[in-house]
Image (spheres, coloured by chain):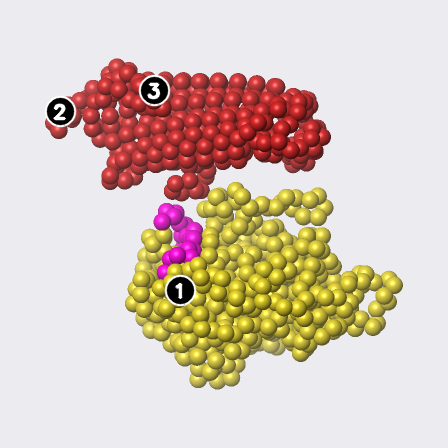
Chain colours: A yellow, B red
Amino acid sequence: MEIIIKGGYVYDPLNGVKGEKLDIGIKDGKIVDPSKLDERSAKVIDASGKVVMPGGVDLHSHIAGAKVNVGRLLRPEDHYVSFIKAITGVKRSGSGKTTPTVATIGYKYARMGWTTVIEPATPPLKTRHTHEELNDIPILDKACFPLVDSNWFVLDYLSKGEIEKCAAFIAWLLNALKGYALKLVDPGVAELWSLGKGYGLDFDDEIPSFGITPREIVTGLCKVNKMLKLPHSIHLHCNRLGIPGNYSTTLETMKALEGMGDGISVHVTHAQFNSYKGDNWPALRSAASEIADYVNGHRHVSIDIGQIMFGGATTMTADAPFEFALFHMTPIRKWAGSEVEVESASGIVPFKYKKKSIVNAVQWCIGLELALLIKDPWRVIPTTDHPNGGPFTRYPRLISWLMSKKAREEVLEKINKTALRRSVLPDIEREYTLYEIAISTRAAPAKLLGLENKKGHLGEGADADVAIYDLDPTKDLTDPEKIVKPFKYAYCTIKDGEIVVMNGKIAKTRYGRTFYVRSQELDKDLVEEVEKEIKQKFKEWYTVQFSNYIIDESEIRHPEPIVVGG
Amino acid sequence: MAVTLVPKRPFEVLVDAQCITPDEFVGKSLKEIGDLEVYEGSAVRKLSDLFEIKGDPSQTAEETQITIEGDVWKVCRIGERMSGGSIVIKGSAGHYLGRWMEGGRIEVHGNVRSWLGAEMQNGTIEVFGNAGSFVGGRLRGKVGKKGMKKGLIIIHGSVGARAGHGMVKGSIIVDGNSGPFPGSEMIGGKILIRGDCMGKAGANMTGGSIIICGKLPSVLPGFYIDDIAQKAKIKKEKIEGPFYVFVGDALASRSCGGRLYIHKASNPHLKVYEELLEEV
């Protein structure tokens, strides 16, 4: 199918296009030179007076896996009032707001113009479940990050100082699980949680069973990441998340990776939850300027903000001790938690962020401060850490807050007044331009993921993922509602050269690809030796058979390996 | 001012008919009412495919009276969120009858399935047959003050399990017997059961009162005897006792805000509690 998008204001940061009127040509699922297409046979979309951007890329959104599913089971009340109807041949039905059902996720993302979404935390043993769900998410391209921070193999190799062997294990693991990058959640905490401990584990506290500290885990896995030449840096959820005063730990973590040479980088995820000052909850203050200052001065760090949105949320993380502590703080008396043998843990607590709560108001300010104080939009990604900070469906609102000071002031008037004195947000004048929004929601995440040749741009040869918004950049954009509505319902979304959304409605259901990494960097003898060791230990440590652990390529609907090294 | 619906054929699968409410019918012609969407199983149908529609609709919800002539045992969600007017069903009705209802009146001359008047905000429901479980109950997964808020549910037959689950205020009157767990997790309001109860009355209740005139096999261990009352009161009606009065559930809250009124004459096996009362 050939498509020509005519006369739109194109925002394509990776190719340096800043809102110029250009035509975009699409043929066989790729972007091509529009002058080579025949206008008579191709479908022409008139985009005059509209904004054309690459399809959105979300690098941190919990959309699939065992804990997401438990979240759905835990929250039937989330599904009573929010649902979509089936249209035969076009879309399936679904329900849920903060824990949407599988098909709904795809439709709601596509409706906003997002086309690539990453599930950022999957315990290795439960990754088969994750892939089953990813397979059934329509429209989107996706990938998943396995959790490696509390894996016994990793801890064992790192505590012995065998970095090469650890790298060989990680390479084997990513290939066996069809994973994309390394996710660290509160490094080492799941190992302690299996003993019923772990709340507030700091960066230099020792994990007794392996005699190793989170510092060694993070630096070790950073080296492994570099050794394997993985496309994404390590995806790090720092220690002491959600504990007042944790910003020092976050700074410590980032500093630990400072002098490790070229190629060492770290993505600190949902940094808002890690930028708290103060000794206890009532005294919570924003430490966003300290974090932002550090990120501004050091190029090895990128962050996503993990903005909270006032309203309902379902917190779910592999940081089980924190969730257990949160459960005792919330009035909603239910939670779920689990421990995954040898590897990981998780916890789920339903939560509601309130405007009048001083803590929640400070949290809200911190997220936006981070996004606005960090000068380089290539290294700060607006996310809500769906569904921890709020559902992804509220990205348009988040974009309006970034783009308009007036929109922020509307909320600032309603929130807790004491919180305002503890943050610098009311004094920040900066407003994102549409170009910066295109960077931080499209080009930058694609670049951080190492997918910049396929995703996040509209140059020739890129995947034909395009979003068109009914938004005129030449007109005045100070009214927040004028920003929210076009982003909420994209005029048109094109995925792999097919129109999937038209006029804000799903037009077609198709299934995207799943990216995974196949590393060929390492010496073959070493890999064989390590595999032998893995098989041996497997019998001792696991309740499952080695052969049942490995996920075959045939289990994935549209696998797309990304070969690195070799 | 009245609209009459007559089922064209017996229903074989569950029908989702949340559009059958006075609020939806307001200001519509009979044809427009017939075009409203309902789901029969997974198939989308028009209301006129399933029902013959007669009468003349009115301009306000209060004036609208909907009569269903026949059995709608498989039709669910009738009267959802209705704010006024009335619905009379001359037959049996399905699940979620009058869920989230905000006013008006529903009358059923037959039996009703589960979740009758679930989380209702106000209004009156009268059932001349029996009702299923979770009458006036709080929906699954919700916690806290989300149950029935106000209003009155009268059931002339018997009810299933967990009548008034999590209710906050309002009254439920049952002329027949009750299944297990009436008033579970109750926060306020009153329940009267004129017949027998299968047991476990008031499990986890933190407020409100339950009056049981018939037999109760045993009182849960979270309850303490407090008094013997000569009368109990619900909706200005005085019920002659004497009643054993229990407070609880101590497992749910230490303040023991809930009250159980158990009829003394029907429950001779509870006489042992009188000794405890004398000690105090």
Q: Nearer the viewer, residue A354 or A255?
A: A354
Q: Return the residue nearer the eye: A553 or B189.
A: B189
Residue at the far top in the pictured view = B265
Q: Are marks 1 and 2 in contact (CB under 8 Å)?
A: no
> Would you say residue A336 sits in the magenta stretch?
yes
Quadrant of the drawing holding the C terminus of chain A: bottom right
- Separation (CA) of disc 1 from disc 2: 57 Å
Query: Which residue is denoted by mark 2 in the rendering?
Result: B278
Nearer mark to the viewer, of 1 and 2: 1
Same chain for the residues at labels 2 and 3, yes or no?
A: yes
Q: Judging from the image, what secondary structure is the residue with disc 1 in?
A: helix
Q: CA distance from mark 1 to mark 3?
A: 53 Å
Image coordinates of residue B201 in percent, x first then y, are 33, 28
Output the chain of dot 2: B
Check disc 1 and report the residue beneath it.
Answer: A362
Q: Which residues are magenta?
A: A331-359
Q: Residue at x 42, y 60 (%)?
A: A415
When asked about the image quadrant of residue B59, the answer is: top right
Residue count near mark 3 (Cα–Cα under 10 Å), binned few <14, some 14–19, many ≥20: few
